[in-house]
Amino acid sequence: MALTTPRTMPGVLELLPREQIAFQSMLDAIRRGFEVYGFVPIETPAIEFAEVLLTKSGGETERQVYFVQSTGALEQAGRPEHALRFDLTVPLARYVAEHERELAFPFRRYQMQRVYRGERAQRGRFREFYQCDIDVIGKDTLSVRYDAEIPAVIHAVFSALDIGGFTIQLNNRKLMRGFFEGLGIGDSERQLLVLREVDKLDKRGAEHVRGVLTGEPFGLSADAADQIMRFVEVRSRSLADGHAKLDALGAGTETFEQGRAELREVLDTVAAFGVPETAVALNLSIARGLDYYTGTVYETTLNDHPGIGSICSGGRYDNLAGNYTKSRLPGVGISIGLTRLFWQLREAGLVHAADSSVQVLVTQMEATRLPDCLALAQALRAAGIATEVALDGGKLGKQLKYADRAGIRFAIVAGESEWARDAVAVKDLRRGEQFEVPRAELVQALKTHLVRAQVKPA
Amino acid sequence: MALTTPRTMPGVLELLPREQIAFQSMLDAIRRGFEVYGFVPIETPAIEFAEVLLTKSGGETERQVYFVQSTGALEQAGRPEHALRFDLTVPLARYVAEHERELAFPFRRYQMQRVYRGERAQRGRFREFYQCDIDVIGKDTLSVRYDAEIPAVIHAVFSALDIGGFTIQLNNRKLMRGFFEGLGIGDSERQLLVLREVDKLDKRGAEHVRGVLTGEPFGLSADAADQIMRFVEVRSRSLADGHAKLDALGAGTETFEQGRAELREVLDTVAAFGVPETAVALNLSIARGLDYYTGTVYETTLNDHPGIGSICSGGRYDNLAGNYTKSRLPGVGISIGLTRLFWQLREAGLVHAADSSVQVLVTQMEATRLPDCLALAQALRAAGIATEVALDGGKLGKQLKYADRAGIRFAIVAGESEWARDAVAVKDLRRGEQFEVPRAELVQALKTHLVRAQVKPA
């Protein structure tokens, strides 16, 4: 029979087991952070009605959509009825609108699932990837204090991930819009265009952006362009510096003042959440690509790896689900693109394949001792220690080599002399050490060693 | 703007948050069981090359496949290049063949992901559902002892799920095939056809099956049909009974004796794993629909809900990945269809919406005390207690009503008199009780109460 070449589609990140364990431990840490801050889980189907996903027709989004058809439907003409979700925000909007009467508000949900985009195959671009999202959705109103809770969650999660120093950067779209109004750029369409240009500042540089702003179609004065450039260069280094920088902006329009007041409250409340002030900074250049943010916006960058860009972004929006319901549902949230982040961290040498989640291999020397080996293993498992038994038996050297290759740290070895003494030998394969313990003390001894090895019991 | 009706595709199970928490706790328990038994995680992409997924062309499987196309590809004719996985077995085969040289064998993987089938919309039929699979894959050989480990894992997992008594039922395809050979049904195609008829025994009844076997095209003698009926009615109630029932079958062909020896070893070794003998039974009617099982086969049923059918099935196969590699990869595994199981348990009233994963709501009475509320919340979170703060403030009654509706068990309440005493009130919303504790003792007091309430800290 002709063999089919086993391969995955380009644009997916398939991991070997020890990488998957490292990835899973990041997912677990994120989930723990979300849960301890009082977010509840939801999951939505990957397949949705195309009509529901694509309420905003046309545009970039639609071109990246994967449509889904069962074999029967393939023969029919026309656009397929179903599609794969391309983010978790549209499904959230649909979910909240659909289940509105059954939910308690503020609705604080976390969702960690894969999303799908028909991207061109390209290094570092993923067609299937995890997003880890939190959002707080209010009914009619939602205090700006929730905007301050988000950085506290970001701080808890990225501290737990232990991937180095990071800075949570804040801006406010009202401050930005008010600022532009003050320069006579009152039209919201035009503001958006200017914001989009300003958003390119990091990529294209100040000169380029100034040139675009003073050229067609913007036609701003050199002074206005300079004011914009100075504005977007504002950064803060501490809570007091943040307030000082906001002071130094001078008076502005009503929208501007609203944005400034919100930013002040967010800065103060973030500090009250116990987030170190060095981890938080104003960055008045942040606009965020999405058009629907209306207040606070967030980006988070790794201090030692600015090239990776924002690893966690989001913001405040006025109305989540206007396409599905007449209820007004303001919210605030962020998203972590974990597949891409993991890939980048690995590229940068910042994550490594983990030890196996299997902590102990019980080797088997004589088949007649199998019941003793199994009893040992069951005692370890009952204590929560992830244990494998070498049921195939065979040469001890081969069994130990397997454990080493699989990343299993400890191996239990017992020949007749050990069984006769009612003892077993424990090999620490990482350290190349070995010690003997009485059988009755094995569980406790391994627990101690596992804690010392900082390997978490399952 | 016209509203789009928010709705999901038929055939998906979308859960409200408290149901999702119950579902997630089942996923967690299954994962914990798999890990403690020394299985390592993998995840594969939902989208694969259709050519890779559909190496066995045609048939039922292909008709249920969802094909995937990005917008650009829609305009092109022909069968789409990509499809969604319809199980976790084909992706496992592809994964092992693709990464063979990087894996350690025996390769013991668990995988808990959603799969997709273009089923007709029908109550209890799911188009998108979770499978939770384990498999042990050997290179060239794999001891039958691994067949005995699988029931130990099943027993651990379903005990942890706490859904009532269950029985792990065993059969062996060699025993069955050898038995048919003994009746002169030597042709393996014909054996398969008879096995398929026998597989309908529970659904159609003995009379129907006997009629089919003695009629065309089988044309068996009444005696042969009766022998088959007696054979498939064999059940055991204990380890000794299992051996006795196997003895009572009398002598058989070489294949038959091989199957009997395997079943004996599996029964004995399952007992050595510490699985209670009442939880395991021979059931010689189990054939399993899939054609590729070659040895031990498993089904698991709930003792008090036989109508639910098998909640966990699988078996031993000779060669996992013959479509992708020339390596011989024998294996043994099982699958839990968790979405369908959850749905059935819910229908039977056996699972209920869980308490919220949020354990404590810190209410807010005066805005000036917000920093104190936040400090309290942070202390609880640092102790691993999932905590939400009512950042919107508002009337206390409304805040408590929210906690009750969201399923949050404990609420912290502190007015000026409590703050003045450096104390807070704790309301147990489930019991309708309230007590006061000094602020410094709050974390410890809540930990004690949460343990008592058997609510797991995050």
Image: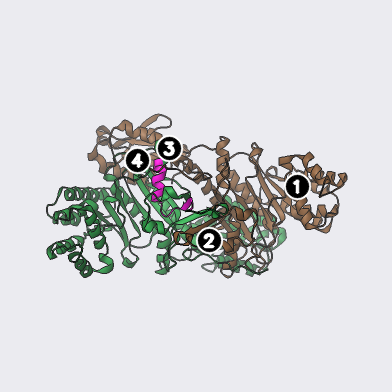
Chain colours: A green, B brown
> Marks 3/2: CA distance?
52 Å
> Marks 4/1: CA distance?
56 Å
> Marks 2/4: CA distance?
40 Å
Residue A390 at x, y = what percent?
A: 64, 61
Q: Secondary structure at mark 3?
A: helix
Residue type indicated by callout 1: Glu
Residue A196 at x, y = what percent?
A: 26, 60
**What residue would you read off at disc 3?**
B449
Q: Nearer the viewer, mark 3 or mark 2?
A: 2
The magenta stretch is A79-97
Residue type indicated by callout 4: Pro
Residue at the extreme top of the image, as rendered: B432
> Marks 1/3: CA distance?
56 Å
Residue type indicated by callout 3: His
Same chain under badges 2 and 4? The reply is no
Same chain under badges 1 and 3? The reply is yes
Chain letter for the residue marked with disc 1 in the picture: B
Location of residue A247 by image quarter: bottom left
**What residue would you read off at disc 2?**
B82
Which callout, 3 or 2, points at the residue further toward the start of the chain? 2
Side of B103 relative to A170 (left or right): right
**What residue would you read off at disc 1?**
B197
Residue A283 at x, y = what percent?
A: 24, 59
Residue A435 among magenta residues: no
> Marks 1/2: CA distance?
35 Å
Residue A447 at x, y = what percent?
A: 52, 55
Q: Nearer the viewer, mark 2 or mark 4?
A: 2
Same chain under badges 1 and 2? The reply is yes
Which callout, 1 or 2, points at the residue further toward the start of the chain? 2
